[in-house]
Amino acid sequence: MKIINYALIATGFLGCLGMKAGAQAQPTTLPENPAAQPQININGTGIVTLDGASKNTFGTKGFATNSAINLSDSALAASFSERLYREGIGSITFGAQSYDFTNSGIQTGLFVNQAFLDFQTKKFETYIGRTDAPTAMIVQIPTLRGDDLVDFTMLPNPFSDGTNLEESRYSNVGAIVFNQGLTYFENLHVQHLIDSVNSGTGTGLNSYGGIFQFETVPTLEPIATIVNYGIGYEHRSIPNSLGGSSDAIYGGGTINVKRGVTNRLDLRVFDAYTTNNNTNSIGTVNDTYRANANAIAVTLRYLNSPFGKPSYSVALTAGYKDFRNISGANESTLVLTAAKRLGEGFDAVAQVEYFHRAGALASLYGQSSSAIFQIGLSFSFGDVINENVGPRRTPMNILEHYLPK
């Protein structure tokens, strides 16, 4: 036994001598703990509708038809989360969704809408990457698809050419978020708004701002009078060749007109006011995103949930947008949206949209009024694997907007 011990000591001693005489040992990375498995959140939504229009109003640039099978806005996302050594949670999220090009099948119809890293503690959070633009959907308007009323329900991206409406909903963003009791939130952020119009900003930062928001606890939404509200400011660094920089003030909120777990009626309001850009004519879709305007959307939604399970919902949304520096240019909309629960996460859906455009907008779109009818099916699901942490910015929370962006 002693001989074996001496041999081991001698081997170690000779090894040290060899290390000194020869090349230095290779540096090693910090060892990972293979037993620490991340929590995995997976969420998906699928929606397909059969669409009919009174005129050629479907799609965006390159599409014109009065009927379509619409596959857009279906999405799949996954996040991976770990509890950190001292305090907090670290996570990474990936996601993609279909958009209008999916309907044609001639181009790649997937858009990367989530690809970001997040660090959060109880009172502080920071995230960076591609995710929901902080300016988008401060109030969630219950239309079938999130981009149905992009002109009325969020700040349109002044760098977008209008081909992909998702460019107003998502951006490359770096944000710091403070909270008080997970009820009041302050979001300070910088953004690269996607520059598909090739304004010259490339991939550089072209927007910054801040938001203050209040959110009631998600489980108390049916019985709270004030569900949420928020107000924000955004500065967009638009080149002088496109009218110069633009400033925006926007805000909105949700209140329960009739509170109740089984029957609920809520009112949602959003208003966005943009100023300081010098665009004074409309010749392209991008002009409508840059020109000074005031847009407002109001929704009254009824939700029937017997025994706490959603049964059906009906929402009526009205919107109006006026371009202040362009005489006679305005647009309005009226949308009726309905959904009937057929099973867990599976719904039959329908929507009727009416649009009216005046002045330069009617000339741009080639018509002063149009109507669209959609009927189809929607499915959503979510799953958690190895649940051991509770990150707030999960795909489900992003999808349902439980937390301020």
Image: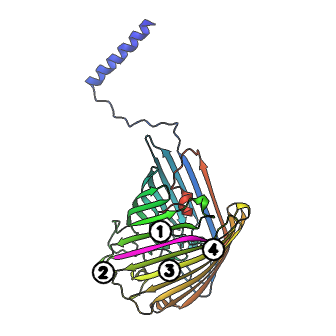
Mark 1 highlights which residue? 230
The answer to if 248 sits in the magenta stretch is yes
Q: Name the residue located 40 percent from the left edge and 14 percent from the top edge.
A: 8
Q: Nearer the viewer, mark 2 or mark 4?
A: 4
**Is 28 situated above or below 40?**
above
**Identity of the amino acid at label 3?**
Ile
Q: What is the three-letter code of the residue carrying label 2?
A: Ser
Frontmost of labels 1 and 3 is 1
Residue 18 picture quarter: top left
Residue under label 4 = 301
Please provide the residue range marked out in magenta: 246-256
- Whether residues under marks 2 and 4 lie with C-beta atoms below 8 angstroms apart, the answer is no
- Where 163 sits versus 355, above or below? above
Residue 133 at x, y percent in the picture: 45, 66
Element type at mark 2: helix
Asked whether 287 falls inside the magenta stretch, the response is no
Rendering coords of residue 382 (x, y %): 62, 56
Alpha-carbon span between mark 1 and mark 2: 33 Å
Instruction: Indicate the secondary structure of the residue bearing disc 3.
Output: strand
Q: Nearer the viewer, residue 313 or 374?
A: 313
| Residue 241 - label | 2
N-term-proximal mark, 1 vs 3: 1
Q: Amino acid at mark 1?
A: Gly
Query: Residue 85: x and y, percent?
Result: 44, 40
